[in-house]
Image: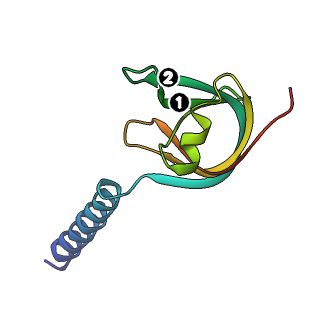
Amino acid sequence: MKRNKRLLLFGLCALVTFSLVCATNLFAEDVEDEGTIIGTVYAVGWDDNGDVTAATIMSSGGEEYAIVDNAIGRNLFSLDNKVVKASGVVSEDSEGNKRFTVTNYEIMPE
């Protein structure tokens, strides 16, 4: 009888632990990390007037980051095919797409 109670208690503890781990992963927010990227800016979206509305930065390591449309990031939209050194916050959405919120940048000499 004592053995059955111990097994039941152990099973209940394991179930609670498993539930907590799953809940933590379910409600986890996007992963964010501050960093600096040196790479080439590419325009990837345009409006009806031909103005750039979206851009990405391709790092020298081959990683692609969508540039977040904020006040500073929007400045990079006009730097199509230019190499920049940009600092900011890298995040990843639930689908694995990388975004870069630029806080500072400089155009690299050619």
Colour mapping: rainbow
Badge number at residue 44: 2
Query: Where is residue 33 shown, x and y percent of the image?
Result: 59, 54
Q: Give the answer, above or below, for where 31 lies relative to 110.
A: below
SS for dot 2: strand
Residue underneath mark 1: 55
Question: Residue at (39%, 24%) from the top-left corner?
Answer: 47
Residue 6's quadrant in the figure? bottom left
Q: How many C-alpha atoms fall within 10 Å of the one at disc 1: few (<14), some, or many (≥20)?
A: many
- Left or right of 33, for residue 95: left
Query: Where is residue 26 shown, x and y percent of the image?
Result: 29, 54
Badge number at residue 101: none
Question: Residue at (17%, 76%) from the top-left corner?
Answer: 5
Judge by depth and name the residue closer to the eye, 92 or 83: 83
Q: Give the answer, above or below, for where 76 lies relative to 2.
A: above
Number of labelled discs?
A: 2
Judge by depth and name the residue closer to the eye, 8 or 64: 64
Question: Residue at (33%, 61%) from the top-left corner?
Answer: 24
Q: CA distance from mark 1 to mark 2?
A: 5 Å
Q: Which numbered disc flags the more N-terminal residue, 1 or 2?
A: 2
